[in-house]
Image (cartoon, helix red, strand yellow):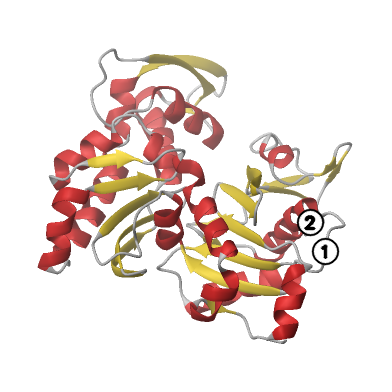
Amino acid sequence: MFLRRLMGLFSLDMGIDLGTCNTLVCVAGEGIVLNEPSVVAVRKGTNEVLNTPDGKAVGLAAKEMLGRTPGSISAIRPLKDGVIADFDITQAMLDYFIRKVRGNRGLAPRVVIAIPSGITAVEKRAVFNSAQRAGARRVFLIDEPKAAGIGAGLPIHEPRASMIVDVGGGTTEVAVMSLSDIAVCTSIRVAGDDMDEAIMNYMRRTYNLMIGPQTAENIKIQIGSTAPLPEELKMEVKGRDMISGLPRRALISSEEVREALKEPVGQIIEAILHTLEQLEPELAADLVDNGICAVGGGALVRGLDIVLAKASGLEVRIADDPLTCVARGTSEYLEHLDEWGVAMESDEDEY
């Protein structure tokens, strides 16, 4: 125990929000120090990370290559639906991010990683192994809803209900917490990526226009909405005509995007209602006053709070800086790692 604490004094402990779309890293006492896309560019047919004049093609440098690579290069998102889809590429990505943050400071770090609450034991082991091989000394796992709740400033340690809806890139986590634990949770693999896919499908069906994931994401950010806007928006979209095969453009509106998003948003609403139906009466009563807190990148889609409030009958608020809530929550766990670590799921203790 003494040796563990002594080593902790000389290591740069990190909290990681290992997201499908973005990975955020925070350091105890420093806050968020890295926020980059979860993308790696490799030479096709290998796991060799591509080198660029500015360094390894990981994160921002790799995301710029999505959909634009020649045949010899693949830009890969190694996480799908919130879990590791490509073990070796995830390890390479984590290794790059940990080294970038750590530099030459301290011993190998202890790492707290936020994971979706619904993942399997095999998927958890993949997270442990990836972090260990990337250079972590100890690895602790924390459920994303807990981290998000703390990062959003919810009183999850108190004996009353706090409800979080975390709409990420690959998963949506709906959880009600009380006394530092999850009372009821629903995790679905429908989130921001599915919204992008729905927009791509709409453009194919309605305009015979093929667009890529980055264009769809940009449409969602620029004019996406789930409720009527005071002034509806329009946007010019460029892609490839499915009939002629030639590049062309189309003008779409926020009303059309709203129509495209109905299905994924409807599934998120179903997850919320399913969670509420499972609550004990006292916890349900707490939510009449406390309402729902929405976090994650998907929470930034215009009007989502309005739609969720109408469906649930509860007040819905968007957290401050919803994109970083999970990472900020892992930072809080870092601050109390010696105290809370014994109750957290971790890899085998070698010390």
x, y percent for residue 117: 41, 67
Foreground: 223 or 34?
A: 34
Q: How many marks?
A: 2
Is residue 171 visible to the viewer in this orientation of the structure? no
Can you tell which quarter of the image residue 294 is in?
A: top left
- For residue 322, what is the image quadrant? top left
Image point (28%, 32%), residue name: 226
Q: Which mark is residue 106?
A: 1
- Residue 162 is situated, as x and y percent measured from the top left of the image, at 28, 57
Residue 307 position, x and y percent, is: 22, 37
Q: Residue at x 79, y 59 (%)?
A: 46
Left or right of 156: which side holds 58?
Answer: right
Of discs 1 and 2, which sits in the foreground? 1
Q: What residue is shown with label 2?
A: 102
- Along the line of sight, the residue nearer the viewer: 281 or 30: 30
Q: Which class describes the residues within 10 Å of circle 1: few (<14), some (14-19), or many (20+)? A: some
Task: Check contact, mark 1 vs mark 2: CB within 8 A.
Answer: yes
Along the viewing direction, whichever of 200 and 191 lies nearer the viewer: 191
**Vertical position of residue 138 compared to residue 163: above or below:** below
Q: Quadrant of residue 105?
A: bottom right
Tell me where residue 281 appears, x and y as whole percent. Answer: 10, 66
Which residue is rendered at x = 30% and y = 64% of the image? Answer: 158
Position of 115 relative to 72 (above/below): below
Q: Is residue 349 left or right of residue 344?
A: right
Left or right: 51, with 84 as reference point: right
What is the three-letter code of the residue carrying label 2? Answer: Arg
Please indicate, yes or no, whether residue 309 appears anywhere in the rendered image.
yes
